[in-house]
Image (cartoon, grey):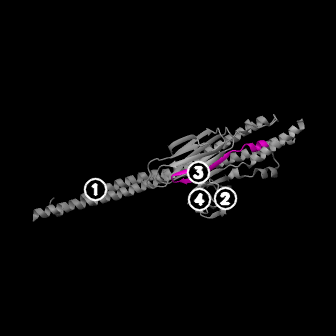
Amino acid sequence: MSKKTRVVLLQVILLLMLIILVQNGDCIWLNLPKSGRKCVTEEIHNNVVVLADYVVISDVHIHPTPSITTKVTSPYGSILHQKENATHGQFAFTTSEGGQYLVCFWADDPNQGGALSVNIDWRTGIAAKDWESVARKEKIEGVELELRKLEAAVEAIHDNLLYLKSREAEIREVSDTTNYRVALYSILSLGICIAASVAQLWYLTRFFQKKKLI
Amino acid sequence: MFHTILIIVFMSCLLISNVVGIRFVIDREECLSITVDYEGDTVYVSFVVIKAESPWHFTEDGVDLVIKGPSGDRVFDMHDKTSQKHDFIAHKKGLYHFCFTNKSPYHETIDFDVHVGHFAYHDQHAKDEHFKPLFDLIAKLEEALYNIQFEQHWLQAENDRQAVVNEKMGKRAVHKALIESAALIGASVLQVYLLQRLFERKLGLSRV
């Protein structure tokens, strides 16, 4: 093989590997029960981009693949995405409130039998950022793009740390309130105990004096 | 020139790390699976039991986790843990299963996070030696940052668990004080009533 052919072949192989690698998704497989629904929640902050992609695979090879219904609910109950009779789909939204977001799956036809697996590719925040468009818009590539990605990751870590700090402050506040409450209510209990015994003594003395025993 | 650009673009896509963090309610048993694409990847897994759905739960029951490899072999297991972090090297590529078993009779909420870290520079074919050390360092940095994000997610879940425990403790303190006072008042009223009845009967018998 001539040198030029080898170089071209290598470039083709690299391009193919690139395509294969780009199509690999991050994913997790959930097993759907035959009846009832499977729900997963995630705590997401305000103003975060969420992208998700799901595919249904049947364990027992049933044709056609059973379809499922998907529902995405925000923390305040509003439905962000609902789709019935689908074997694959995707949804994307930007959160307008922080809290627990609920994604539920259930099989459309419970009688169709066979266990179902759902493959979810779920990305939030920094993982959902489209780096291709950023690279094209700002005309950066290679090392600069990688460093830009790392900078965004570091910022995300910093934001997360600040959020953890605020949560920890809340916990500390509740702890302090509990401490104060335990002290207050213990003294109150003791006071009620003493008051009850004094009342008893007073009542019984009066009773015995009335019956002329004292 | 095209070759160099291709290498650069190729390298930037090699750092694919799977990071997943979800929270779900477990009844008896729950299984999740994740694909590991390359041999030799390190898989980091962590879980935290956020809360148990019962009002008077006071024992620290945990859940069991069994990790099974693509061919069904048992990779790792741990029993009765409320929070755990673990990492292992995946010697085979394929579908790894993480199965949780809940032994307590109540529903529990579990926060589960798994992160597959892949170092691509072992098997890349770049001929351009000038860029290799730089990309190696960037790859290491990215791996370290993903690791930090993974640890932060676990820390956040632990924090959530503490928040739930704290709130329960506050409510319990108030309930305990109220019930104790009520019981005390009830007991003293009962005492007085019984003594009064006893003496009235005795006096009634002796006076008649």
From this view, report whether residue B132 is shown above or below residue B30.
above
Which of the image's four quarters has the N terminus of chain A? top right
Q: Can residue A144 be seen in this view?
A: no
> Pointer 3 and pointer 1: residues touching (CB < 8 Å)?
no
Give the residue displayed 48% in from the left and 49% down from the top: B103
| Amino acid at dot 3 | Ser
Instruction: Give the structural element (helix, strand or loop) at label 1.
Output: helix
| Amino acid at dot 4 | Gly
Q: Mark 2 lies on which chain?
A: A
Q: Mark 1 points at which residue?
A: A197
Q: Name the residue under label 3.
A: A166
Q: Which chain carries label 4?
A: A
Q: Marks 3 and 1: same chain? A: yes
Front position in the image: B179 or A75: A75
Q: Name the residue under label 4.
A: A113
- Of callouts 3 and 1, the N-terminal one: 3
| Amino acid at dot 1 | Ser
